Image (cartoon, rainbow, N blue to C red):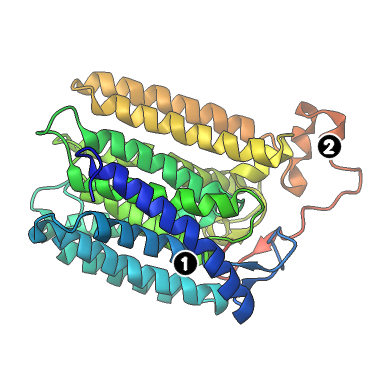
Amino acid sequence: MDIGGYPQIAILLVAWSISDLLMPVLIQVSRRRSWLDRPHGHKTHQEPTPVLGGVGIFIAVAASLALTLQTKPSETWFPIVGLFLGCFLVTVLGLIDDFRPINAVVKLGVLVAATVVISRFDVCANILPGGTSNPLNVAITLLWIVGVTSATNSLDHANGNTAGSIAIACGSIFVIAWGNSAETSQSWLSYLAVAIAGGCLGFLRHNLFGGRIFLGDNGSFLLGFLTASCLVFARWSDDPIKAFLMPVMILTVPLFDISLSTILRIKNGVVGSVREAIVYCGKDHLTHRLLALGLSPRASVLAVYSLGIVSGAFAIAIHGIESRISYLSVTAAYLVLLVIIGALLDQAPVHRNSRRSERFLPPRLRWPARAQAPRGDGRKKNPVASR
């Protein structure tokens, strides 16, 4: 299946359609089987909700590639097969964790196993010479995938947050993978990017508008692992600094969310150590802070999307800059922007000891005199949180 010589269009439409059509089926199956995320603790939804969104996205992405790229040479499928074997392991891990919480050590072990699997299929960082034969590249790949998967899971605290942010990131990946010529294009990376984006867009119609189904850990683990793997699968630049910066910029939203939350928890004395900051579970992530500053739920998610678009634009910009001094200057401007955003978000009264920031807020948004911290502030058992 090819539309005007551009299989990317077909992949996007097929993945979008399959995902959109699968979600109602998964909702019905989940309700019949009582496979639901029930409100408790730090969770903010009011009704038991299906959490098989990730399963639908996985099927949509895999099916769209299989249906539209049947005529491609078989040898080009080699890294894709490995990638989806790893994704299958991670999705099953998240699915189990949605209904029977798994120990953090077990989660890490599965992520390590999945990373080893994809590295055997040549999906590995190439920042250092030697490719997969260099153990440091495998270690970098592992750290990157574990970090991004955890960050993406942590970002899943509001409807549309994770799937929309990943879809936007995939848009940036596609632009870079498309290239300026046949010599610079990365066809398979562009196929993967539009397939993931299509799967996310089909899911969003049922999640962003009404929250009829959630990603669950199965979905947030899948999207984190899949996107992180795509980014190490890519050929960014022969310059190792640029090759490191571009993936980080593309995935700014999840990485910034988990980093800012951790830093501000320590800075504001909410926790007493880095370990406590990582395992702490409270309503102090990006959208929580935007809500506390007066934005509506819809505006908060749109603000998160805007950050993803701007960060992707920075990544695309430095991709086209050859001079190291020039692209490092652009990177410095990007970091200054993130620091300013972080300082503004630090003013949000999301913790008990955040009353100092209320002078920046209109009276209607300030905590009552005897207000308590938002319900759900506390510690979570596993470093990788569920929604």
Would residue 123 be found to the left or right of residue 106 on screen? Answer: left
Q: Where is residue 189 in the image (x, y as percent from the top left)?
A: 23, 46
Position above or below: 221 against 245 = below
Q: Is residue 51 visible?
A: no
Residue at (24% x, 20% y) in the render: 325
Of residues 179 and 244, the one drawn nearer to the viewer in this rendering: 179
342 or 308: nearer the viewer:
308
Q: Which mark is residue 218?
A: 1
x and y percent of residue 360 in the render?
Answer: 76, 27
Residue in the picture at 14% in, 47% down: 128
In front of the other: 18 or 108: 18
Looking at the image, which residue is at 60% across and 81% down? Answer: 33
N-terminal-most mark, 2 or 1: 1
Quadrant holding the C terminus: bottom right
Find disc 2 in the rendering and name its residue: 366
Instruction: Name the one closer to the observer, 357 or 64.
Output: 64
Callout 2: few (<14), some (14-19), or many (20+) C-alpha neighbours within 10 Å? some
Q: Position of residue 246 (x, y in %)?
A: 30, 36
Please tell me the numbered disc located at residue 382: none
Disc 1 crowd, CA 10 A, few/some/many (<14, 14-19, 20+): many
Q: Identify the secondary structure beneath mark 1.
A: helix
Amino acid tagged 2: Arg
Above/below status of 333 relative to 35: above
